[in-house]
Image (cartoon, helix red, strand yellow):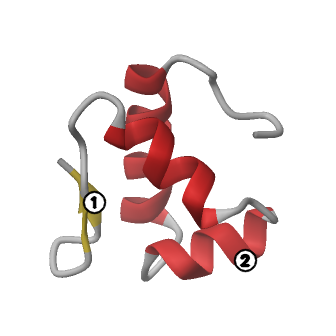
Amino acid sequence: MTDLPHDPFMLMSVINMKLRDYYPNLDALCEDMNIEKEIITTTLGSIGMEYNPITNKFW
């Protein structure tokens, strides 16, 4: 995860901010930032967070 926090709670904050302000969905964020979607979903899943495509955020 280049330039992203390794702490899952900080990562969630950064990812949700980017989703809110810059990207229409998680796939677009991952493609643009060249990050594997599985890494984000696994890391945030470890703290019980799941991506909701309707609200476009992890919660």
Which three-letter amino acid code belongs to the residue tagged 1?
Answer: Lys
Mark 2 falls on what kind of element?
helix
Q: Residue 42 placed where, x, y %?
A: 47, 46
Numbered disc total = 2
Examine the rendered structure and indicate whether residue 31 appears above or below residue 18. below
Q: Residue at x 52, y 17 (%)?
A: 7
Q: Residue 54 placed where, x, y %?
A: 16, 81
Q: Give the crowd class for mark 2: few <14, some 14-19, many >=20 residues within 10 Å.
A: few
Q: Residue 29 placed where, x, y %?
A: 60, 69
Q: Residue 15 has which mark?
A: none
Most distant residue in the top direction: 7
Examine the rendered structure and indicate whether residue 42 appears above or below residue 43. below
Q: Residue at x 59, y 64 (%)?
A: 37
Foreground of the two, 15 or 49:
49
Would you identify the image quadrant in which residue 8 lies?
Answer: top left
Q: Residue 33 placed where, x, y %?
A: 76, 62
Please name the residue that numbered disc 1 is placed on: 57
Mark 1 falls on what kind of element?
strand
Q: Residue 31 has which mark?
A: 2
In this picture, residue 44 sits left or right of residue 1: left
Q: Quadrant of the N terminus?
A: top right
Q: Residue at x 21, y 36 (%)?
A: 48
In this picture, residue 21 sits left or right of residue 46: right
**Decide: marks 2, 1 in contact (CB < 8 A)?**
no
In this picture, residue 58 sits left or right of residue 3: left
Which three-letter amino acid code belongs to the residue tagged 2?
Answer: Glu
Examine the rendered structure and indicate whether residue 17 appears above or below residue 14. below
Would you identify the image quadrant in which residue 50 lies?
Answer: bottom left
CA gap, disc 2 and disc 1:
16 Å
N-term mark: 2 or 1: 2
